[in-house]
Every structure is written in C-alpha cells, then in structure tokens.
Amino acid sequence: MDIIIKKIKITVFAIALTTCNYFYAQTNKTETELDVLFQKALQSKAFNGNVLVAKNGKIIYEKAFGKADVSNTIPLNKEYRFHIGSIAKEFNAVGIMMLKEQGKLKLDDPISKFLPELPSWANTIKIINLLQYTSGLPQIKWSEVNQDSDNMAHLQNTLTLDFEPGTKYDYNNNNVFLQRRIIEKITNMDFNSFVIKKILKPIGIKNAVVDPDEKEPLLAKSFNDKGKQDVLKYNISGWTALNLKDFYKWSEAVNSFKVINQESTRELFEPFSKDNQTGLGGGTIENGKVTNHIHDGAAFNYQAILISSPDLTIILMTNNKQNNLEEISNSIQAIVDNKPYNMIR
C-alpha cells in the first residue's frame, strides 16, 4: 500500500511539475513575443510609451518603451505618469454616482438645483443628461476659454441650447465641466482635491496627479512627430494623469465595484443609444460581473486605451500619439491567445 501511495505522489508531482513548466514556457513565449512587438514598434516610431497586460487578475507584462520627452535623453520607466485624455472623465462620472449613493443627488435632478447661477435652461437639463451627453449644451469655445471661470461665464451668457435635453447625443465637454462643478457645490471641495482624496487614495492610488504642470517629476511630456513638445495648458480643469500600476488599480476597482456599487456601475455603462459613449466609455455587466470595459482618450499628443475583461486587461499609454493603440491592443490579444498577429509599423 505504501508503495502505491508513493507512486501516486510521484505521479501527481510529475504532472504538477509538467504543468508548471508548460505555463512557465507559455509565459516566457508571451513575454518574448510582446518584447518583439514593442521593440519593432519603437524602432519604426509607431509606439513610444508604457504598456501593461494582466491575465486573470495577474500582471504578466509591464514595460516602458522610448523617451520621456522630446529631448531623447530621458528614457521612460514604469513610474512615469501620462495624461489619459477622456478616460479622466470617468472620475467625475464616478464622483456623481458616489454622491447619488450617499443620497446627495438624484440622476433626475435638474442641474439648476445645484447651479442656480445658470440660465433658465438649466431647469430642463437633468444630471443623467450630463452623464449620457444628451444635455443639448453647446460645445466649449476652446479658442476663447482659458480657465474654468471663462467657460462658466460663456454658459451664463448662453441663451438657448442646441437641442432639447434627452433627445439627442452630442459628445461634449460642457457635460463634463458641469458634472465637476456640481461635485464641487455638493462637497465644498475643489474637484481636483475631491478626485485625489475621495476617489483615488481610498483605493490605494497614491501617485496620480491632477492638472500637473511642466515641473511635475515623472510626468511624460507629449510631443509630435516633428520634434515639437506640447505646452501643458488646461482650458478647463480636472485632468488626471496616472502611471501603469495606478491605472490598473483603477480598472480593477471599477470591475470589482470597489468605488461605486454594481447598480451605479451599470447605470454608467448604459448609453443613450447603441455605440454612444457613457461616463465610463463603454462596457457591460452580466451575472454580477463586468464582462468588458473599454475606454480610450487623447489630449495634446498623449493617447491612452483601456481594454478590460475578466480574463485580460490591456493598458497602453503614449506621449507621441500615432492613433494606432487599438491596432496594438489587437496584436497583444492575439499574442496572449497564441494566435498570429500583425507587427506594428
């Protein structure tokens, strides 16, 4: 009997060892192929930035490629923060839902309840219209707006809306601007402080910065293909920059309903109509789990993309926008799935 048990143990150990070796080999193969993908993309100037890939909740690849600014003397590393463009709008959308859960607002509340200084059309716009980009607000006049007060003055002098609230979709930063102002009115905090203290720090995100200036350390500086570096300017405030690990923490917090509950997350994923953007970009919940969460954004020559599902998360951030992050993410997915993939050129 002891001999049989000993043989069984040896067999089980051998199977376990073989399995471990297989997964180790697969992981090495994946990392090698991802290195090849990104090294070639770097050489062809198709990608300059940072990448994180997580499989089944575990980070399997996290690297930096290229330079931190236009000087070509400072290499990027994994700690660098990047602006993430429109993905930063998730923080005001989640902030609104946090206040809803606390009973401090309702999505059907007219925005005039919190911003009485706006014209009478504010009585017809509900908070849900801001979240779904269906408010009818005009586009921000970027050439005339240099700070929040300029934009608020423009809105106070706006006589009519572009369309009746709730009847059409128009992706518009005035919706974002007013969400942030409502959060400030309710909390008596400036929005930037609210994001850091009430959303990010409680979930362990310590390295994020909101509206960083040129002197901020470990901030990737964006530049174009002609060798010109962007000047950081915020016509309206409230833009968060993250590094890879913190971006991944944020994605996982959304997926696990750590900041807002499942119902609030579902409401943020609900578009006005099919394929429209929402406060969280786009996503679905099935059987109590986030089955996908996709959001992309760009600002200056920064660009970022988040693609997350229960088994795979891809985060790409660049400071030299090439409008190819979706293509790169498709190649990453193929490599992870051990399928043929396209080189990025």
Image (cartoon, helix red, strand yellow):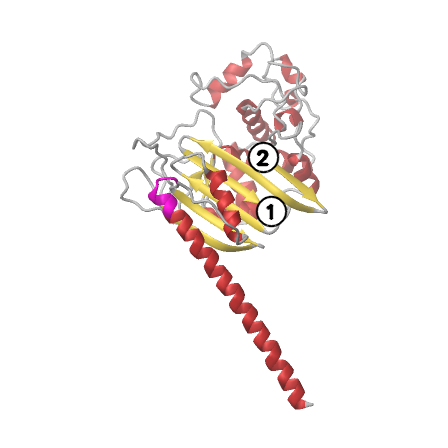
Circle 1 SS class: loop
- Mark 2: amino acid: Gly
Picture quadrant where residue 137 is located: top right
Q: Position of residue 84 (x, y in %)?
A: 47, 37
Q: Position of residue 129 (x, y in %)?
A: 65, 24
User: Residue at (39%, 28%) from the top-left corner?
Assistant: 233
Q: Quadrant of the N terminus?
A: bottom right
Which residue position holds label 1?
Answer: 309
Residue 279 or residue 150, whichever sits in front: 279
Placement of 153 over or under 198, stated as above or below? above
Which residue position holds label 2?
Answer: 281
- Mark 1: amino acid: Ser
Placement of 22 over or under 71, stated as above or below? below
Would residue 230 be counted in the magenta stretch? no
Can residue 114 be seen at all in this image of the molecule?
yes
Placement of 57 over or under 7, stated as above or below? above
Around disc 1, counting alpha carbons within 10 Å, would you say few (fewer than 14), some (14 to 19), or many (20 or more)? many
Residue 168 or residue 42, whichever sits in front: 42
Q: Which residues are magenta?
A: 40-46
User: Residue at (62%, 77%) from the top-left corner?
Assistant: 12
Which badge, 2 or 1, comes first in the chain's sequence? 2
Circle 2 SS class: loop
Q: Quadrant of the C terminus?
A: top left
Picture quadrant where residue 281 is located: top right
Task: Tell me whether the residue at label 2 lies in contact with that at label 1, contact meaning CB atoms closer than 8 angstroms.
Answer: no
Q: Position of residue 237 (x, y in %)?
A: 47, 29
Identify the residue at the far right of this view.
287
Q: CA distance from mark 2 to mark 1?
A: 14 Å
Left or right placement of residue 263 versus residue 74 in this view:
right
Would residue 41 be counted in the magenta stretch? yes
Residue 60's label in the rendered image is: none
Identify the residue at the far top of this view.
159
